[in-house]
Image (cartoon, rainbow, N blue to C red):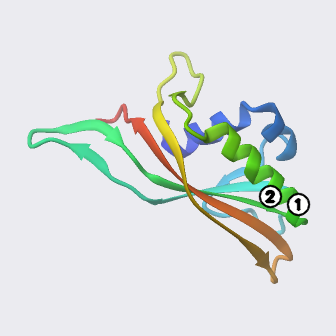
Amino acid sequence: MTIGASLRSFLLDDNAISVLVGGNRIYPVNLPQNTKALSLRYSHISGERIVSSRRDLGLASPRIQIDAWGPTYEGVANLADKVLARLSAYQGYLNQDSPPSTFCQGAFFESERSGFEAESKLYFFSRDYFIWFEDALA
């Protein structure tokens, strides 16, 4: 499972977030066209992997941007705050697969911004996080 898919699963496991996004409106990279309901979008902005002179050690720290989008500023700020509360300094498995596969060593808030997109008529509240996780691919 990719870090994005694991994060999506982790966020949807939180009832408060899941209710706000209708149980499924968390998308990678782009929102579907004509989306008007409260939604989340995540993007992999940058990242690094910890390696030794001999091998990849299996620890990665991507910078993930998570954007709340919706018709009101209050709604997107509230959703973004719920994501922050869920992720802030979290340590543990991000997904509950059997067996769970993505172990997060730490999730840390980095920066934020907000605004309004005139074309879609949607507000957004965006935060960046560094997610340190053990990558099973290494």
Instruction: State whether residue 108 is above or below residue 97.
Output: below
Q: In the current view of this chain or complex, which residue is farthest to the bottom? A: 118
Lateral position of residue 77 relative to residue 62, left or right: right
Q: Is residue 123 visible?
A: yes
Q: Position of residue 20 (x, y in %)?
A: 86, 45
The image quarter in which residue 15 lies: top right
Foreground residue, 54 or 24?
A: 54
Q: Which residue is mark 1?
A: 74
The quadrant the C terminus occupies is: top left
Q: Is residue 37 visible?
A: no
Lateral position of residue 92 relative to residue 21, left or right: left
Image disc number at residue 77: 2
- Which residue does the image show at 62% across and 40% down from the upper left? 87
- Which residue does the image show at 81% across and 59% down from the upper left? 76
The image quarter in which residue 11 lies: top right
Label 1: how many Cα within 10 Å (few below 14, some 14–19, many 20+): few
Label 1: element kind: helix
Number of labels in the image equals: 2
- Which residue does the image show at 79% across and 40% down from the upper left? 17
Instruction: State whether residue 97 is above or below residue 14.
Output: above
Q: Position of residue 62 (x, y in %)?
A: 43, 51
Lateral position of residue 97 relative to residue 105, left or right: right
Label 2: how many Cα within 10 Å (few below 14, some 14–19, many 20+): many
Q: Position of residue 132 (x, y in %)?
A: 42, 41
Q: Amino acid at mark 1?
A: Glu
- Tags 1 and 2 in contact by the CB under 8 Å rule? yes
Image disc number at residue 134: none
Q: Amino acid at mark 2?
A: Ala
Q: Position of residue 91 (x, y in %)?
A: 52, 29
